[in-house]
Image: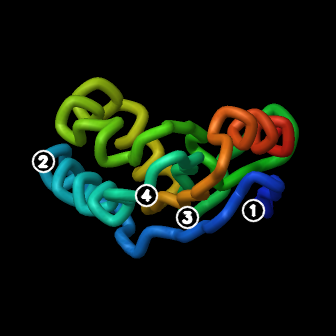
Amino acid sequence: MSIKFKCDHVNQEFTGSVKVNAKEKEEFIVQYRSAMVETKGVAGIVYILKTELPIPRLKGVSDILYIGETKHDVWSRYYAEQDANKFWSVYSHALDSYGAICIKVYQTSNNKITEKVFLQQYY
């Protein structure tokens, strides 16, 4: 089930073209960095990491791995290598079980409120 998020604060949305599907951490870092480069310069955002296949939830399923926000861009918020090292067990499990990961970005006039609205729609 893919949720169509809506919020009055959203000005623009786009889905990154890079699909992160590497099974080895080193290649994952390269792909993850490439996915983040696409978001460079797009500030005041809510970003969603999505998987190809749905992930079981307490009730139903969803293709959403993570919802986050930043007043900057994703490129400035994350360091691909550090994030991959810290969360490799999560990413590798998601890739093995639910397929490639992509990023969807929503540019917004209020990233905090937009994230809250999206989380309410998600839950």
Closer to the chain start, of discs 4 and 1, is 1
Pointer 3 residue: 52
Is 85 on the left-hand or right-hand side of 13? left
Q: Amino acid at mark 4?
A: Val
Residue 108, horizontal then vertical, whole percent:
64, 52
Q: Amino acid at mark 1?
A: Ser
Evaluate if marks 4 and 1 touch, with contact meaning CB atoms under 8 Å apart.
Answer: no
Q: Nearer the viewer, residue 44 or 53?
A: 44
Real-space Cα separation, disc 3 to disc 2, in angstroms: 21 Å
Pointer 2 residue: 26
Real-space Cα separation, disc 2 to disc 1, in angstroms: 29 Å
Closer to the chain start, of discs 2 and 1, is 1
Residue 42's disc number: 4
Q: Amino acid at mark 2?
A: Glu
Q: Which residue, as the protein is rendered here, is positioned at the far bottom?
A: 17
Residue 37, horizontal then vertical, whole percent:
27, 60
Closer to the chain start, of discs 3 and 4, is 4
Closer to the chain start, of discs 3 and 1, is 1
At a point 78% along the width and 57% down the height, the residue shown is: 5
Q: Viewer-nearest of labels 4 and 1?
A: 4
Q: Could you tell me which secondary element the residue under label 3 belongs to?
A: strand
Q: Residues within 10 Å of mark 3 (few under 14, many from 20)?
A: some
Evaluate if marks 3 and 2 touch, with contact meaning CB atoms under 8 Å apart.
Answer: no
At a point 54% along the width and 60% down the height, the residue shown is: 104
Q: Quadrant of residue 3?
A: bottom right
